[in-house]
Image (cartoon, rainbow, N blue to C red):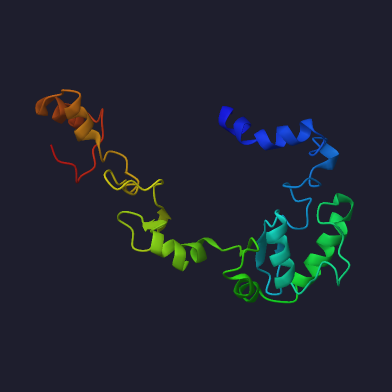
Amino acid sequence: VDGAAYLASAIFSGNSVGAWSNDLDTVGTNLLDGGAHFYQTYECKDGKFMSLGAIEPQFYAELLKGMGLDEKQDNLPNRMDSSQWPQMKERFARIFLTKPRDEWAEIFKGKDACAFPILSLQEAIANKHNVARGTFVKKEGSIDTHEPAAAPKLSRTPAHGSRPMPIPGSHTLEILTEFGFSTDQIQSMLKSKNVVADKNSRL
């Protein structure tokens, strides 16, 4: 709870100076909650999505350029005029529907437009950048199941992926031994079925 509250510091600060409304009927009208047309997700021609986060003016200018818009020639409103955000969101939505996601991704590739494709889980795993960084790793004991690698990455004490999910009884003998039970005592508990151990477990 404390961490979540701290992460919302910018929102509380904005609310204190009138830059963020906390009324329930105004949710989705603020800068970072889907209100701004330049901080939003948009569906593309192929049903996939692009995400935008072009808050700063230099990023917004690159975004407009990639979308084929010019602030002056197209007589666009001031980007921070929230009264124009609904209209601009509709305009952006129409434009993004004209091309498939990957075509938009190629347009913005290498540009400081803060415009990126939203990937599926499998696409994220196969993404070249993620592969190069080792962002995802194969789950131990699995052929094709991946999971996020531990972060941050430490050179002297690298973390390892999670172990396969244990089956009931797989650690019974190990735990009983750690608690100091003798082999005879453990065998007696097994025989009386007070405990269960996996058949592959060994004393």
Camera-side residue of 81 and 95 = 81
Camera-side residue of 161 and 89 = 89
**Lateral position of residue 172 relative to residue 102, left or right:** left
State which quarter of the image contains the N terminus: top right
Q: Position of residue 79 (x, y in %)?
A: 81, 56
**Lateral position of residue 168 relative to residue 109, left or right:** left
Camera-side residue of 7 and 178 = 7
Camera-side residue of 75 and 27 = 75
**Lateral position of residue 130 relative to residue 42, left or right:** left
Observer able to see residue 40: no
Disc tally is: 0
- The residue depicted at 73 percent of the width and 64 percent of the height is 61
- Residue 187 in which image quadrant: top left
Answer above or below: position of 190 versus 68. Answer: above
- Residue 6 in which image quadrant: top right
Observer able to see residue 111: yes
State which quarter of the image contains the C terminus: top left
Q: Position of residue 157 (x, y in %)?
A: 28, 43
Answer above or below: position of 172 versus 110. Answer: above
- The residue depicted at 70 percent of the width and 54 percent of the height is 56
Q: Position of residue 150 (x, y in %)?
A: 39, 47
**Lateral position of residue 11 relative to residue 188, left or right:** right
